[in-house]
Image (cartoon, helix red, strand yellow):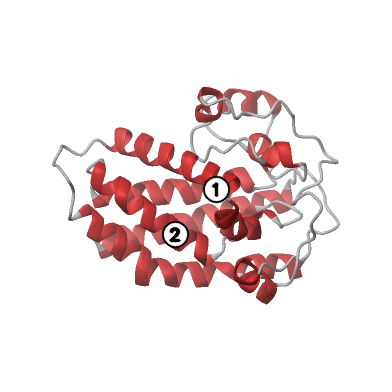
């Protein structure tokens, strides 16, 4: 188990460095609020969630994988599809249920998108997600190895589709038929609520087409990022915001 987790950490670190360097060398969109202070604030969420993952999330997932409701052969592609479908519905629930939105809004209050946005998640959201996912793991008999592989893919794809990298339009059009690209996910962060409540996919883009939650809006350079009618706040205020209903 330790070796799998170690590989996961190194892969994610490598993907982060790749896209972080890429978006600073060839950014798709320039932004005045792309400051080092903002980057530092976003990155401050990462050690909190890494610690939570090692102490709580991974043990919960491992426990669930050892208490499956039935046995089956490991089929990694099937496992990835199952878990990605779960994340689609979980992500959608975080937008539609006010209690969950209070935690998820911390992610959306970011007023620019780049690789650091992909690690800006409130620890409460991460914790609740792991509890619900544990049920999915047991019901669909997902082995622990598939869980770690999926988590590695999810983090890598999140870094990719939050990134501010410049991709040729033809390449993006081809990729977006199957996977979520920056052009798709940036619309999800558009500070217009009807767009915010769309494009929920994480790895596969076709879930939004299947369940009719794909936005018709196309990404444009002047697209305002964030939450409609809200402003971003400081790190410590973001941590307590879901519990105190701070506006």
Residue 244 percent across, percent down from the top left: 64, 72
Q: Is residue 56 above or below residue 171?
A: below
Q: Are marks 2 and 1 in contact (CB under 8 Å)?
A: no
Q: Residue at x 15, y 38 (%)?
A: 72
Front position among marks 2 and 1: 2
Q: Residue at x 61, y 59 (%)?
A: 102
In the structure shown, which secondary structural element does the residue marked by tag 1 occupy?
helix
Residue 184 shown left or right of residue 52 in the figure: right
Which tag, 2 or 1, sits closer to the chain's start? 2
| Quarter assignment of residue 84 | top left
Please indicate, yes or no, whether residue 142 appears anywhere in the rendered image. Answer: no
Please indicate, yes or no, whether residue 247 appears anywhere in the rendered image. Answer: yes
Residue 218 shown left or right of residue 51 in the figure: right
In the structure shown, which secondary structural element does the residue marked by tag 2 occupy?
helix
Q: Quadrant of the N terminus?
A: bottom left
Residue in the foreground of this view, choosing between 38 and 139: 139
Q: Residue at x 63, y 24 (%)?
A: 173
| Quarter assignment of residue 7 | bottom left
Instruction: Determine which residue is flagged by label 1.
Output: 158
Q: Point out which mark residue 58 bears.
A: none
Residue 46 percent across, percent down from the top left: 54, 67
Label 2 crowd bin: few (<14), some (14–19), many (20+), radius 10 Å? few
Label 1 crowd bin: few (<14), some (14–19), many (20+), radius 10 Å? many
Residue 51 percent across, percent down from the top left: 44, 72
Residue in the foreground of this view, choosing between 133 and 160: 133
Residue 79 percent across, percent down from the top left: 31, 38
Q: Residue furthest left?
A: 71
| Alpha carbon distance from label 2 to label 1 | 19 Å
Q: Quadrant of the C terminus?
A: bottom right
Q: Residue at x 43, y 46 (%)?
A: 153
Instruction: Determine which residue is flagged by label 2.
Output: 128
Residue in the foreground of this view, choosing between 220 and 29: 220
């Amino acid at each position: 188990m330790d070796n799998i987790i170690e590989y996961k950490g190194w892969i994610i670190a490598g993907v982060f460095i790749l896209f972080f360097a890429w978006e600073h060398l060839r950014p798709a969109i320039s932004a005045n609020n792309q400051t080092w202070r903002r980057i530092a604030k976003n990155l401050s969420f990462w050690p909190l969630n890494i610690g939570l993952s090692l102490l709580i999330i991974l043990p919960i997932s491992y426990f669930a994988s050892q208490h499956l409701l039935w046995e089956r052969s490991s089929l990694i592609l099937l496992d990835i599809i199952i878990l990605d479908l779960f994340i689609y519905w979980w992500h959608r629930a975080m937008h539609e249920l006010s209690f969950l939105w209070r935690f998820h809004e911390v992610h959306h209050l970011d007023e620019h998108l780049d690789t650091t946005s992909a690690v800006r998640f409130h620890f409460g959201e991460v914790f609740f997600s792991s509890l619900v996912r544990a049920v999915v793991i047991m019901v669909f008999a997902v082995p622990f190895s598939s869980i770690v592989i999926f988590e590695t893919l999810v983090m890598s794809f999140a870094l990719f589709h939050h990134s501010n990298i410049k991709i040729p339009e033809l390449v993006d059009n081809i990729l977006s038929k199957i996977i979520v690209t920056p052009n798709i996910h940036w619309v999800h962060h558009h500070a217009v609520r009807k767009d915010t409540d769309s494009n929920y996919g994480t790895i596969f883009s076709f879930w939004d087409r299947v369940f009719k939650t794909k936005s018709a809006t196309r990404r444009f350079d002047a697209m305002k990022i964030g939450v409609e009618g809200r402003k971003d706040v400081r790190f410590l205020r973001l941590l307590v915001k879901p519990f105190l209903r701070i506006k």
